[in-house]
Image (spheres, rainbow, N blue to C red):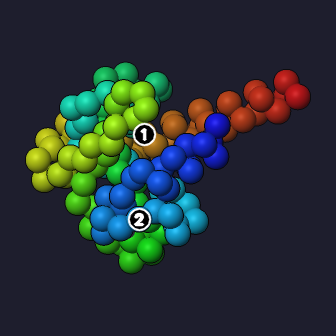
Amino acid sequence: MIEDFENWARKNVECCACGGTLETSICINIIELKKQATWKFPVAGHIDIPGYEPRAVAIVCDECIMKKEKIRRCIEWEGSPYQVKYHDVEDLEDAKKNMSQMDYYFGRLFRQRMLLRAANQESKN
Ligand SMILES: [Zn+2]
C-alpha cells in the first residue's frame, strides 16, 4: 500500500519547492506546514489535540530537503484516480494555534503518548 503511494507520487506529483520530478528522489518527503488547509486531502491533523485545524502539506524531493529550499506550493488531490492540484503557500492563511505552545505539546505530551502506545503494542505481542 505504501509502495503504491510512493510509486504514484513519483509519477504524478511535482516537488512543491523546485517543481521538479520526484522520480529520482529516494524518499517521498511529506512536510506539514504552519498553514491552514482549505481542502480535504491530504492534510495533517492530530487526533490527540482537540481543535487542531487541518494543515496544509507539501511533498518535496530529497535535494530540496537537503538544501532547505523554500516550499512554494502545497498539494491537494481528489477524485479517483487522484487529480493533483497545487496551492501557493502565500495564498494560505497561517495556522491559528500558537506555535510555541504546540512545540511544547509535541515536546512533552505528544512524545509521552507515542511512547505509551509503543509500550502497549509491545506488551500485546
Ligand atoms: Zn525539489
Q: At 64% across and 46% down in the image, what residue appears? A: 3
Q: Position of residue 123 (x, y in %)?
A: 85, 28
Cβ of mark 1 under 8 Å from ligand 1: the answer is: no
Earlier in the chain: of badge 2 and badge 1, it is 2
Q: At 25% across and 36% down in the image, what residue appears? A: 37
Amino acid type of the residue that numbered disc 2 sits on in the rendered structure: Thr
Nearest the eye: 110 or 38:
38
Q: Which residue is mark 2?
A: 21
Q: Secondary structure at mark 1?
A: helix
Q: CA distance from mark 2 to mark 1?
A: 35 Å
Nearest the eye: 18 or 79:
79
- Asked where in the image residue 113 lies, by quadrant, the reply is top right
Query: Which dot marks residue 48?
Result: none
Query: Which dot marks residue 105?
Result: 1
Mark 2, residues whose alpha carbon is within 10 Å: few (<14), some, or many (≥20)?
Answer: some
Residue 119 in the figure: left or right of residue 70: right
Q: Position of residue 70 (x, y in %)?
A: 27, 67
Picture layout, residue 94 above or below residue 48: below
Q: Secondary structure at mark 2?
A: loop
